[in-house]
């Protein structure tokens, strides 16, 4: 099978013409000498280091802490473009939460034959401890990170959903902070919608799902695995912004019907836990008995309405890559609406015909592990040599249920600073959708950029960088 290489949509240029949302930036770039650009880039790196924004990468030897490369050339979206994404992400978050509430209760979508039961109940992220429990407001996934890619002026696709503990929002906030500090004039000349309300919205969302036994203003904490975790900076950053305590499992204990935090003034009741640890480690009495990160008895208090865990244990079943293929059907089933944002066409290797097609066309497809993340465990066919493809084919044949495949999309490209000036590099976008009493988004998200020319892998763990994302006001 052969295919014509699709044209790549350049978000700044339409042929030789600069698209309207980028016209201010094009003038800004042209007026900046190379020496000043180099100086500003060094200044940005120094600022990132000063505030401690590093990303831990393990298993590579040497110092695991490194700086995520920051690109100073912002990505810009018009108000109209954002309106569509905003509506589509909210719709998706609502459907995913309806699905979670359903599969841990009546399973109507399974009984209706819309989703195979084994994809849910045999999923490693499906938690039996959550069956029959309805969390406050019926919300299982309180922070939904939806990864989006663009292929044309009006073509946006959802690459995957992140319903557990999507990371990266600290970079969205700090990218903006640093850009505003370095180029205040640029912001005065452009009408850019702010993102700094995120922490307030997050705190409001968490407070809105306080448990039924909570009296008065809820006490919220962030539960972290500790400073060795790759996203620890983000945990402490968000705790500071919200004015809440950052705790580890050893700082909490269960007594009676509640969870308590140890303080110098004695125990203090905890109402809402924004957990940044995996399900398996939350409670050694319910999940992994060898966990030193969780709180013994936490799930018992959770199920009795004494504390809320955000996001809920078991939420991960909704962001599995095999379940992903059914999200458009969820939207129709639960909301009675047509999907605003499309999925990327996907082949499930668990299906015999799909698997046959995938194996015959590996050199042109992107193949991912169903439970994989961070850009690991995947094959980018067009960028792989014959031996890599053959070795990956053997993995698929051995365990087809573990893989899905998608076409190699022509991801849009944004101007990015390189040695010789600017050059287009592929990007994706992760907006952060907050689900509580209401569904909220700040206008923007984390734009990740593949800094290597021609690369489609934007993950920070695979050498990608980040840039500020602007949404222009009406």
Image: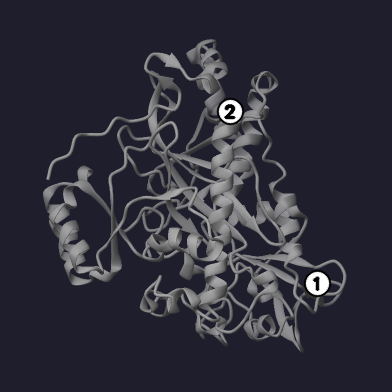
Read off the residue under disc 2: 43
- Residue at 36% x, 65% y: name it: 322
Quadrant where the image shows the C terminus:
top right
Which of these two is toward me, 133 or 329? 329
Indicate left or right for 241 with 175 as reference: right
Indicate left or right for 360 with 400 as reference: left
Which of these two is toward me, 113 or 382? 113
- Residue 231 in view (yes/no): no
Read off the residue under disc 1: 263
What x and y, as percent, mark residue 239?
71, 56
Q: Is residue 157 above or below residue 16?
A: below
Give the quarter of the image for residue 104.
bottom right
Q: CA distance from mark 2 to mark 1?
A: 39 Å
Using a 10 Å C-alpha cutoff, classify the residue at mark 1 as few (fewer than 14 neighbours), some (14 to 19) or many (20 or more).
few
What x and y, as percent, mark residue 228?
54, 61
- Residue 372 in view (yes/no): yes
Q: In the rendered structure, are the residues bearing label 2 and label 1 in contact, judged by CB atoms less than 8 Å apart?
A: no
Quadrant where the image shows the N terminus:
top left
């Amino acid at each position: 099978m052969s295919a014509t290489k699709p044209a790549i949509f350049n978000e700044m240029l339409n042929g030789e013409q600069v698209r309207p949302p980028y016209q201010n930036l094009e003038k800004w770039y042209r007026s900046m000498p190379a020496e000043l650009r180099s100086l500003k880039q060094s200044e940005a790196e120094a600022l990132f280091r000063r505030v401690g924004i590093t990303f831990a990468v393990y298993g590579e030897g040497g110092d695991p802490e490194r700086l995520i490369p920051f690109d100073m050339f912002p990505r810009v979206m018009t108000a109209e473009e954002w309106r569509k994404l905003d509506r589509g992400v909210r719709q998706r978050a609502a459907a995913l939460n309806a699905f979670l509430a359903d599969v841990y209760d009546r399973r109507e979508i399974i009984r209706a034959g819309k989703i195979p039961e084994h994809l849910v109940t045999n999923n490693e992220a499906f938690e039996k401890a959550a069956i029959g429990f309805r969390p406050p407001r019926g919300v299982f996934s309180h922070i939904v990170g939806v990864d989006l890619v663009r292929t044309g002026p009006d073509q946006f696709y959802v690459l995957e959903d992140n319903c557990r503990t999507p990371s990266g929002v600290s970079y969205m906030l700090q990218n903006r902070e640093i850009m505003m500090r370095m180029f205040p004039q640029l912001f005065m000349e452009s009408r850019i919608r702010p993102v700094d309300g995120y922490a307030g919205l997050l705190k409001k969302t968490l407070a809105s799902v306080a448990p039924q036994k909570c009296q008065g203003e809820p006490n919220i904490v962030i539960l972290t695995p500790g400073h060795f975790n790759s996203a620890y900076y983000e945990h402490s950053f968000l705790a500071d912004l919200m004015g809440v305590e950052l705790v580890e499992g050893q700082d909490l204990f269960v007594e009676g019907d509640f969870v308590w935090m140890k303080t110098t003034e004695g125990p203090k009741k905890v109402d809402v836990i924004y957990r940044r640890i995996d399900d398996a480690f939350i409670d050694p009495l319910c999940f992994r008995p060898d966990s030193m990160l969780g709180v013994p008895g936490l799930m018992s208090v959770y199920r009795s309405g004494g504390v809320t865990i955000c996001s809920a244990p078991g939420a991960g079943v909704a962001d599995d890559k095999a379940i992903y293929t059914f999200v458009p059907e969820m939207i129709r089933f639960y909301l009675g609406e047509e999907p605003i944002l499309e999925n990327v066409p996907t082949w499930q290797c668990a299906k015999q015909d799909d698997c046959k097609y995938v194996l015959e066309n590996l050199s042109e497809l992107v193949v991912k592990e169903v439970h994989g993340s961070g850009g690991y465990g995947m094959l980018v066919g067009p960028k792989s040599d014959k031996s890599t493809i053959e070795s990956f084919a053997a993995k698929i044949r051995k365990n087809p249920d573990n893989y899905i495949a998608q076409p190699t999309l022509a991801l849009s490209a944004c101007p990015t600073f390189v040695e010789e000036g600017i050059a287009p590099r592929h990007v994706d976008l992760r907006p952060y959708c907050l689900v509580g009493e209401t569904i909220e988004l700040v206008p923007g998200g984390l734009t990740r950029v593949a800094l290597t020319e021609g690369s489609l892998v934007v993950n920070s763990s695979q050498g990608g960088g980040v840039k500020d994302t602007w949404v222009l006001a009406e």
